[in-house]
Amino acid sequence: DGMLSMGGKSMQLACGDAVYSLPFAMHLGYGILHDDESVSWSDRLAQCAAEYRRLAALELERQSFKLDGVFVGVTDTVAVASELDLLNKPLSKEELMFVLSARAQELSGIDRNQQRDRRLLVHAARVLLLEAVV
């Protein structure tokens, strides 16, 4: 069993006595989603998700994560859980991935004004990050 902590610039995972750190988090994705409005929203979402997946795979290879059991999300993962109405609801990995994937799909359809909403950009970056790391 373990925990997942997500902050603005890094993430930590712990399982038993093992502790792992990912040297990236929400700020990376926020930058991708916010910076270049000449790139379509759906392309920025795809770039963000791809970069998170790439970095997560690199860290998995570098740190040889050994994770299993039940995980508790803390810090910024709680914000995402609250926004998705998941607080205190035990979910399997597959169920959580389904919810995150569905939310990512919903986010791809937001309008131009919503794409400029800082709160929504932070939410989108966190959702895509969790989707890549889970």
Image (cartoon, rainbow, N blue to C red):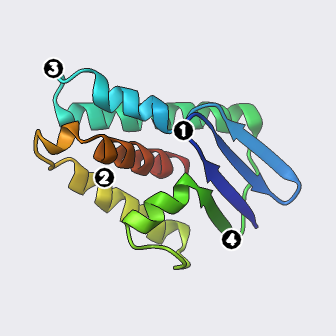
Amino acid type of disc 2? Ala
The residue located at (54%, 38%) in the rendering is 8
Q: Nearer the viewer, mark 3 or mark 1?
A: 1
Of the numbered discs 1 and 2, the one sitting upstream in the chain is: 1
Q: Is residue 98 in sight in this rendering?
A: no
The answer to whether 12 appears left or right of 49 in the picture is: right
In the rendered image, the vertical position of residue 91 relative to residue 100, given as above or below: below
Residue situated furthest front in the rendering: 118
CA separation, marks 3 and 2? 21 Å
Residue bearing the label numbered 1 = 8
Residue bearing the label numbered 2 = 104
Q: Residue 127 placed where, x, y %? A: 41, 51
Amino acid type of disc 3? Ser
The residue located at (68%, 34%) in the rendering is 61
The answer to whether 51 appears left or right of 16 in the picture is: left
CA separation, marks 2 and 4? 24 Å
Amino acid type of disc 4? Val
